[in-house]
Amino acid sequence: MKTVTVQSSTPVVQKQTKDSAFKRMWRNRSLLLMCLPAIIFFAIFAYLPMPGLYLAFVNYDYSLGIFESAFVGLDNFRFLIMTGDLWKLTFNTIAYNLAFIILGNFLQIAVAIMLNELTNKWFKKVSQTIMFLPHFISAVLIGLLAYNILSYDYGILNSFLKMIGMDPVQTYSNPAIWPYIIVITFLWQSTGYGSIVYFAAIMGLDKAILEAAEIDGANAFQRIRYIIIPWLKPTFIILLLFSLGGVLKGNFGLFYNLVGANNTMLYPTTDIIETYVFRTLMTNFNFSLGSAVSLYQSVFGFLIVIIANWIVKKVSPENSLF
């Protein structure tokens, strides 16, 4: 009788040691070098000035400086709460920015997809150039163009209405229509330029996937719905989170040049935090008051980004910022 001995081999467990932070940085030195200009920029212009936030809590005296001026606590915030309709200003600012962000991103995605579907390269380049032009037009010129179109006495719109026998429209005394005018103007100016990011993302999509879908019988709409739009989802989420950080900071140049600073009839629907602060500080300029408003906007935007990122992390963890 032959006995068989079975030798049991114990697995050798190799202890994996994590690389140190310095080794990881050295291994990714090329990427870090590319990021260095942005790191230096934010370090100088975003982090080094942060001690200046103390300015919002003092009664600033030019001769004493920030840290020697009298500490007044939250008094600088009361000017926005007591002398202005804080909640109305906040609502207007947020409502306009949400309209800009949501409608703007959807239009930019649509424009990027349409450009991608164009087969004539010459027409595609010409179309891109024409759509980019409004982004480079000054807000002052946009306000002038709007006035020449909407002016009651000499505007193109009212001249046309008079010519066909209709009554002219008093645009600058009707606050109800200005949200539409402002949103349409913003979209006209920003959509072409904003579509660059989405168009670049589409260019990063492997063309073999689209070709395979086309061979399998997918038409253009099916390729857009099931391939291109899902591919753009991470880009959309990242841009959305970045945009929400400035949801309480209005486009002062656009509002000031379109509406003006002293048209009181339009305040209910066009007054945002920036325009109100500008009018107030024109007669009583104070660094501390302006810093208090900026701090309020920044803290509010920070909280919005944290909440939005938490929601994204629950729904789609791979697309969250952190």
Image (cartoon, rainbow, N blue to C red):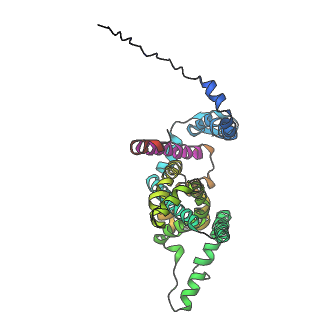
Task: Name the residue: 51% across, 74% down.
Answer: 173
Residue 137 as seen in the image, left or right of residue 223: right
The number of numbered discs placed on residues in the rendered structure image is 0
Residue 100 as seen in the image, left or right of residue 278: left
Instruction: In this rendered view, identify the residue nearer to me: 55 or 43.
Output: 43
Task: Name the residue: 51% across, 67% down.
Answer: 266
Instruction: In this rendered view, identify the residue nearer to me: 156 or 66.
Output: 156
Q: Report the span colored magenta.
A: 289-311
The percent position of residue 26, horizontal first and vertical second, equals 66, 28
Residue 186 placement: quadrant: bottom right
The percent position of residue 302, horizontal first and vertical second, equals 50, 42
Task: Name the residue: 60% across, 82% down.
Answer: 156
Magenta stretch holds residue 304: yes
The percent position of residue 301, horizontal first and vertical second, equals 50, 46
Is residue 261 something one can see in this rendering? no
Residue 288 placement: quadrant: top right
Is residue 147 something one can see in this rendering? yes
Magenta stretch holds residue 30: no
Instruction: In this rendered view, identify the residue nearer to me: 2 or 65.
Output: 2
Task: Name the residue: 54% across, 87% down.
Answer: 161
